Amino acid sequence: MSCREDSKKESMPLNAIKGSYEPQLNYLNEAIKDDPENDELLYKRARVYFNMYRYTDALRDVEGAIKVKSSNGDYYLLGAQINFALGDFFKSIKFSEKAESLGLDDPELSVLQARVYWATGDTSRSTLYLKKAELVVPFNSDISLLKGEQCVSKGDTLTAIKYLMSAIRGNRKNSAAYLDLVKIYLHKEKEDSALLYTLLAKELDPHNPNFYFSEGKIFYQKGMKQSAIVSYKNCLREDSAYALAFYQLGLLYYKEGNTIEAFKFLQKYTAYDKNSKDVYRYLIEILNDQNKEKEAIPYYERLVFLDSNNIGLKYVLQKLYKDYSIGAKEDTVRKAHPEVMAVHHAYTVDTVRRNTIPVKKDSLASQRSAVIQPSTIKDSTVR
């Protein structure tokens, strides 16, 4: 959702200086230093951050503005838009409902509610708000976007493309419309068409990390792995917390045999997703190959937590504790996972050897078999 420009006169610089929002941001930073509890300034800086795709910073500021003045519906609308962009749909609904309860009569609110209810599967409410929005702004870009997405869900990609093109005509910087077009053409294996729309979008909005991520997906699908790596790194240049870019870079480097770079990016990804068993398996395998079994222990511990029924993993972890005389850890595991400590007694040596071979410094292949090989590399969807 695009943010409305403030209709009031303001003394801060214009935002259109070679596509940079830095002049506005610098002005607001200084103003907020002098008046940190000014809700209007916090709100304006939140809008600038939102336009810069710095959603976390934007959310922090708008929540700060709401803390100072909780009766302004515009603040909640922006909060709803930011949460929608972050993918937190239910929090977006909470903010939008608050804006509505405060009497905010803004067609952008209805459009957002139509989109967020559609995203959560509440089609009846989505239709209600869509009709409400169409009465006021029938040619709104995001209305066309939603209709296009609805057609995609029904498998009618031809009609979807028409609506998405209409969304772009209504707002040339409607990033979601471009991204949906890219996904359609990638699914149809028409990489050249997907790349065309990505390049057009980048020209109009050169600081949007989503377009660089899409470009990386296209290059990967075309087999141009080095170009994909460059695009994913450009994505991180625009958004240093773009988790899926870390994931894709880690897997690309892993597949290319560059385990040092693979480990670096996959480890960074775990800061955003602590529940990916495959990522922890990759990290363990890389460390085992480097004879760094002790450094792999924290990743084994996390993997045991995520895959608690894997007796082989638990045996390997218990063996690592014993090999490296980690008594404190052993006590912790005994309390949390008594079955880990009982594995050796529950199975004969032959049975254990068949299921998982104990970790030994001279047996890297055995370590990998105990961890279980990572599944085939999968592409993640465009964010």
Image (spheres, grey):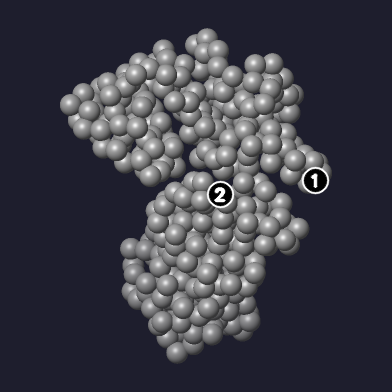
Residue at 29% of width from left, 38% of height from top? 23
| x, y percent for residue 140 | 63, 27
Q: Is residue 163 left or right of residue 312?
A: right
Q: In this rendered view, identify the residue nearer to me: 3 or 367.
A: 3
- From mark 1 to mark 2, how far is it between C-alphas? 20 Å
Q: In this rendered view, identify the residue nearer to me: 286 or 215.
A: 215
Identify the image quadrant of residue 35.
top left
| x, y percent for residue 29 | 25, 34
Q: Is residue 127 left or right of residue 93?
A: right
- Report which residue position mark 2 lands on: 201
Residue 8, above or below 1: above
Residue extending farthest top: 103
Residue at 60% of width from left, 67% of height from top? 220
Residue 237 in sight here: yes
Residue 51, above or below 336: above
Q: Secondary structure at mark 1?
A: helix
Q: In this rendered view, identify the residue nearer to me: 73 or 182.
A: 182
Residue extending farthest bottom: 362
Crowding near pointer 1: few (<14 within 10 Å), some, many (20+)?
A: few
Tag shown at residue 158: 1
Residue at 52% of width from left, 32% of height from top? 2
| x, y percent for residue 122 | 70, 29
What amino acid type should be assigned to the residue bearing mark 1?
Answer: Leu
Q: Secondary structure at mark 2?
A: helix
Residue 64, above or below 16: above
| x, y percent for residue 76 | 46, 22
What amino acid type should be assigned to the residue bearing mark 2?
Answer: Ala
Q: In this rendered view, identify the residue nearer to me: 252 or 365.
A: 252
